[in-house]
Image: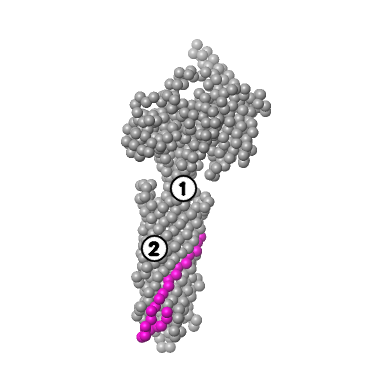
Amino acid sequence: MPLLRALLGGVLAALLLASSAQAQVHLGRLRGPRAAQVRAALRRGLEGAGHTLAEETTQAAATVEGRVLRRRGRWRAVLELRATGSTAETKRVRAAARTPRALGARLARRVVAALAGAEEARAGAAPAEEQRRAVEDARRVVVGTFRGRGARQVREAVVSTFASEARVALVPRAELEASGEDLASAAGLRRGAAPLGVSAYLTGTVIRRGSRWSARVTVRSASDGSVVEEVPFRGRTLRALVGVVRRRGWERLGAAVLRTAPAASGAELGSEQEGGAVVNGAVGVPIDDPIEPAQSVESAQSAQSVESAQSVESAVPGRPNTLDLALVAHPFSRRLRYNDDLYGLLREYTLPFGPAVRLAVRWYPGALATAGWGAHLGVDLRWEQAFAIDSKRADGEVFPTRSRAWYLGLRGRVPLGRHEVSVGVGYGRHSFVIDSAGPSQPGRLNIPQVPGVDYRGLWFQAEARLAPIAGLRVVLHGATAVLFDLGGIGSDLWFPRAKAGGIDAGILLGWETPAGVELRLGWDVRRYFYRFDPEVGDPFIAGGAVDQYFGYTLGLAYRL
């Protein structure tokens, strides 16, 4: 008898599978850009799920048609799914993806799920009383704010994996936030969740460290605001991380969600639950936060505008970087010129080309522990060394020459979406010294007759880091200096009453790879301007001078 029952069960399962495989769908018109690619991917997905495509509407059990559009860099589609010859209201299936092919595959999965739900409803698989009880027993869940670079994609993956679970009813995030409560606190979460009967509140953080991506999803119970569990996800790339969340989201988060309890014990979910996850008696499959009850085309259209507003609201900026480490070649040129040289005794100086290297480190230690204002206060360090820049006089005499610069300061930044502005202040030193050509000898002029400079002072800086397109960075910076010391040029041997100031400006172009390595190319100018205020008896008489440096940047940076 057990063997006979097993054989009968296998035969029955095979018949049901064959019946499902023979279900015919008429794929109607898809309008919009790249509609042909989306349609082809949708067709492959439906055929792979065992459905056959009918040429005529009369031959199909259901008809699918809709439109494709592109918004905010993502491909989106809205399909209308209706049973042939049925007077039931039309269902809508929505999806979004980065490419038309991925969009078609995602639509296929959701159409198959919707068809399966409709088939179960027609077959009376679950009595009305059991469906009502299942809805009332479902945990009402709010997927809250996710922070960090790639947060929007990871949040959508969590919403998608929860939307297909009958034991979960998603509540729009905007409804909970409309309470005005501080959801980060236990008391605020209880007060905000009580009127909605919410059981679980999910938040998350996405972190990129080099080429590795990870996400940590926090599940909190609305009954007392406590953290039930913090669940990690990892991937080699952002796409891989999103895929892991989609495939294993419920497996890793479901047990924690089912351990939560609503904020108000004994709350009647009733009609509120019907707008969460049940559409025409079947569990819906939304792309983002659920919308209000979509029992009609008109309500679905109005809900689509709500969904668009929520998707804009959920696009949180990426996590600010913690470290910017750059090692670049920084060749430069120098030109020293005097104004109003009364007696023509001053020797001007030109360096056409001088090789140099620059190391720049910018570190925001607070970004390791917080996403608040503390994550945007950092330390700035730069060090530059020139080499092989010996100076040569017209008569062939060579003078050893050295140049070095460094800067140490503090910096604060303000993220503006993908862009960033920052200001800084710090102490800097920049020296350029030409030494004598050796011991003094009769008839030999062994001194360069060019004063050495050693600028020391405070620098006040401003910078804008722009991201016009993915991967490309444009950095504009400017600075001004208050100088305390000028070096040899301000001594009694040259210009004892010299006063000077400095300015610095430049542009930097960077191309960032997914591994966090950035190729940089830039140009900058630094200019020191003097006023000598000479008096009778001074060694040299001149009104002022300009000491100008042009620099060029080529190298690599690593951003974490």
Q: Position of residue 385 (x, y in %)?
A: 42, 66
The residue that disc 2 covers is 460
Could you say which is closer to the camera, residue 418 or residue 214? 418
Magenta span covers which residues? 521-543
The reply to whether callout 1 and callout 2 are in contact (CB within 8 Å) is no
Q: Is residue 539 magenta?
A: yes
Q: Residue 211 carries which label?
A: 1
Using a 10 Å C-alpha cutoff, classify the residue at mark 1 as few (fewer than 14 neighbours), some (14 to 19) or many (20 or more). some
Q: Where is residue 131 in the image (x, y as percent from the top left)?
A: 46, 21
Residue 398 in view, yes or no:
no
Frontmost of labels 1 and 2 is 2
Going by the numbered disc 1, the residue's amino acid type is Ser
Going by the numbered disc 2, the residue's amino acid type is Phe
Could you say which is closer to the camera, residue 476 or residue 398? 476
Q: State the image quarter where residue 135 is shown.
A: top left
Q: Does the magenta stretch include residue 193?
A: no
Q: Say which residue appears at 45% left-offset and 18% top-offset.
A: 129
- Secondary structure at badge 2 equals strand
Q: Say which residue appears at 39% left-offset and 24% top-offset.
A: 268
Q: Say which residue appears at 35% left-offset and 24% top-offset.
A: 266
Could you say which is closer to the camera, residue 252 or residue 487? 487
Residue 114 in the image: above or below residue 328:
above
